Amino acid sequence: MHCTIKISEDLFWVGGNDRRLALFENIFPIPRGVSYNSYVLLDQKTVLLDTTDYSISRQFMENLRHTLGERGLDYLIINHMEPDHAALISDISAIYPNVKLVVNAKTLQILKQFFPEQDFEKNCLVVKEGDVLDTGRHKLSFIMAPMVHWPEVMMTYDSADKTLFSADAFGTFGALNGNIFNDEINFDRDWLDDCRRYYANIVGKFGAQVQAVLRKAAELEIKTICPLHGPIWRSDIAYLLEKYGKWSSYTPEDNGVVIIYGSMYGNTESAANALAGKLSEAGVRNIAVYDVSSVHVSQLISEIFRCKCIVIASPTYNGGIYPPMLNLLHDMKALGVQGRSAAIIENCSWGAVGSKKISELLSEMKNMKVITEPLVIKSTLQISQESLLNDITAKITEELI
Ligand code: FEO
């Protein structure tokens, strides 16, 4: 059975959901699934905007056939070549041999890489920034958005209905449950965390490029945003732009502190909990505590994007940093995390080197401010060290309140 949803008079959502996939990109847990959005415009010409992942091909093809009815397909606009959206280009070309693939020069290169057996070039319409595709009532212009999330990414803007097809930007993890519009869901309660986690981990490294696209978007009148994952936005566009403005400039979203600990036998965990309790007593109200060994690194990265202060509490291990914590620190650096206030707690029974190594890694990230001397624990936090814990509490509180 087809499952399509009308967005406007002649625009239809023809995407689908995958609730079976455990790991997006074979990395990121998606317990709520993921949607692959695709759109059909029925103008004088018919237009498909991106395909989907192969995993939902049967549903997608059914949706597409139902929406087009007896009509053929004139254009397939390829805003993004990553296979979660581009897997079915070859199938579409086979079913609709006269379809024109609307691509930019970089897209064409990547298209050839993914489909080396096929000669798509003769069927390609190569566009560049600002070019307009006239489909009848709609005039579709193209906005290059390199590195949001791949180098070929572009967005398509429909000036007739003020709709931005934004590729991965403004997307989120999570399957769509019938309500595909932002005004039909409780986004803050049910989607914001996954939206931030998606942004931070998928596009987080490319803040400067996202800022560049946001500047272009600011010149457009936008009534609807159609991303490739997650809800379609037809209200509160400013809210979404504000979130992206913060995330892409690495501005903390709120005055929170995230304490991330690694703990083999519970002693470092105990120190982390003691710090959280003292922060609460000092009046800090936005405290999150996570075990680096049991919470996926993508969730930790998301929380670091959210919070102003981070505390890294880690055992020394093999003369270095506890491996799961080292993995987090490497991921922070790779994703361009910057501009946070940080405190370090090291636990070692001998050979205190971990805090120095953590400091060094933090110093390789931009504008990271280590706000106190590391608190070094020997095996377990001693009552005699409570004043040091109080010092860290005071410094963090000063940052947040
Ligand atoms: Fe949803 Fe970069 O692909």
Image (cartoon, grey):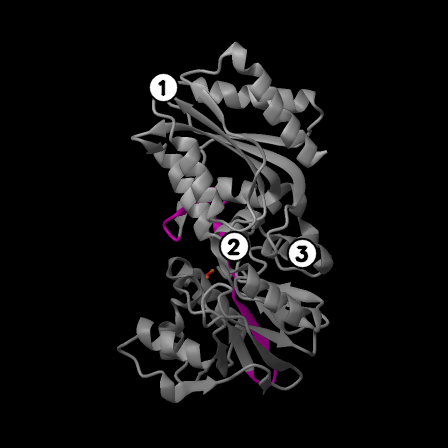
Residue span colored magenta: 25-45
* Magenta residue check for 39: yes
Residue identified by numbered label 1: 349
Q: Secondary structure at mark 3?
A: helix
- Upstream in sequence: badge 3 or badge 2: 2
Residue identified by numbered label 3: 240
> Tag count in the figure?
3
Who is closer to the viewer here, 47 or 303?
303
Q: Please tell me how crowded label 1 is: few (under 14), some (14-19), or many (20+) other residues with Cα within 10 Å.
A: few
The reply to whether residue 210 is visible in this rendering is yes
Residue lying at the far bottom of the rendered structure: 122
Kind of residue at badge 1? Ser
- Tell me what residue is drawn at x 67 percent, y 56 percent: 240
Whether disc 1's CB lies below 8 Å from ligand 1 is answered: no
Residue identified by numbered label 2: 204
Image coordinates of residue 290 in percent, x first then y, are: 50, 31
